Amino acid sequence: MGFFSEFLYPTHWYSKIIVALLALTIFFLLATTAVSGFLLYRIVSPAPSNSQLDFSDFPGHPEVVTYQVPGEGSREGWFFPGLREAPTIVLCPGYQTGRGELLTLATALQDQQFNVFLFDFSAGSSTLKSTLGYREVLEVRAAVEAVAQRNDVDPGRFGLWGTNVGAYAAIGEAEGDRRVAAIAVESAYDRPQQELDLLGSRSGLATVPLIRRATEIGFEWLTRAYRDTPPLSSRFSRLAGEPKLFLEASDEPVLAADTRQLYLLSPPPHDEGVLQRGNYAGMLDDEKRVYENRIVTFFLVNLPPTGRAHR
């Protein structure tokens, strides 16, 4: 009892120093936990996208499609019809980006007779948290499966486009689905932890190593159901023979390096391109047109929209 009493009510100088150090350590750990928890919450809780549009007079005659994501319930996407029985390009939005910001890209593809499907990831339209790619792969798969059930598309030919989180999800889906015949990605990464580190560094809060590590531990706990998921590059052999386009954005040097590494590791046929600025949703009109031409050309060459005209 005397030992514990000395620390509860220190009387010696060394006891007071030890107690003070313990108090500072506990405070530092609590502060680290609080800051890392706040940072992780901000990262995995992107602002919901506003994707409500009136299609009654919208060009291209898009339609709302309701489909199911296993374990998550009903979701809604937009289908833009091209040639009947032509392939479908599924557009996978990036972090804090919604389908509404990809409408002009969808229109550019539809103008070349592709069927196009747009959707939002669950984290951008509900209370679900983003897993920075893990669960998003399953959401892309659900979207592909929903479109493949239609009688006006080619159920065996899909193209995927995506950026950052959408790029990871697109590659992950392509590795597990033989129906995907071509893929174009921008600012891709091999593991969701890479995106976590980047988003943390942007906040400025993860400059303290202990906060960064605590955030990583929290993310690992949040995504524990996917802890056995290997890096994308470990399954690249499944993409052999499938055309791939990797776009690196110069204004995102970290992701540009990650994307280039994926390009170098991927099997042919593959190609890479360098953009002065990424993030399609934030591009100027002239930049968007150049970008759209590049994406449309890639799919026209590698996934030509043969089929029959819609009636």
Image (cartoon, rainbow, N blue to C red):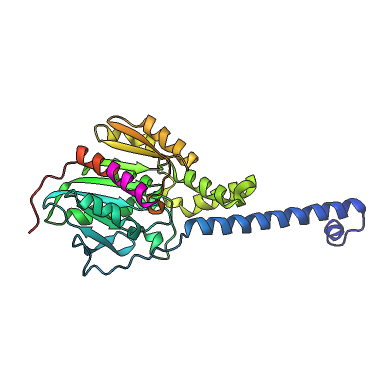
**In-image side of 86 versus 174 (left or right):** left
| Magenta range | 284-294
Residue 141 appears in the figure: no
Q: List x then y, in percent, for residue 268.
A: 29, 29
Residue 259 pos. (x, y %) = 41, 37
Quarter of the view holding residue 51: bottom left
Is residue 217 inside the magenta stretch? no
Q: How many marks?
A: 0
Q: Quadrant of residue 272?
A: top left
In the image shown, does 290 or 255 lie closer to the viewer?
290
Q: Which residue sits at x=56%, y=47%?
A: 201
Instruction: Point out the image quarter for the C terminus.
Output: bottom left
Image spot of residue 306 (x, y percent)? 12, 44
Q: Quadrant of the N terminus?
A: bottom right
Dominant secondary structure (helix, strand or loop) of the stretch shown in magenta: helix
Q: Is residue 290 visible?
A: yes
| The stretch drawn in magenta includes residue 288 | yes
Residue drawn at x 26%, y 35% is: 243
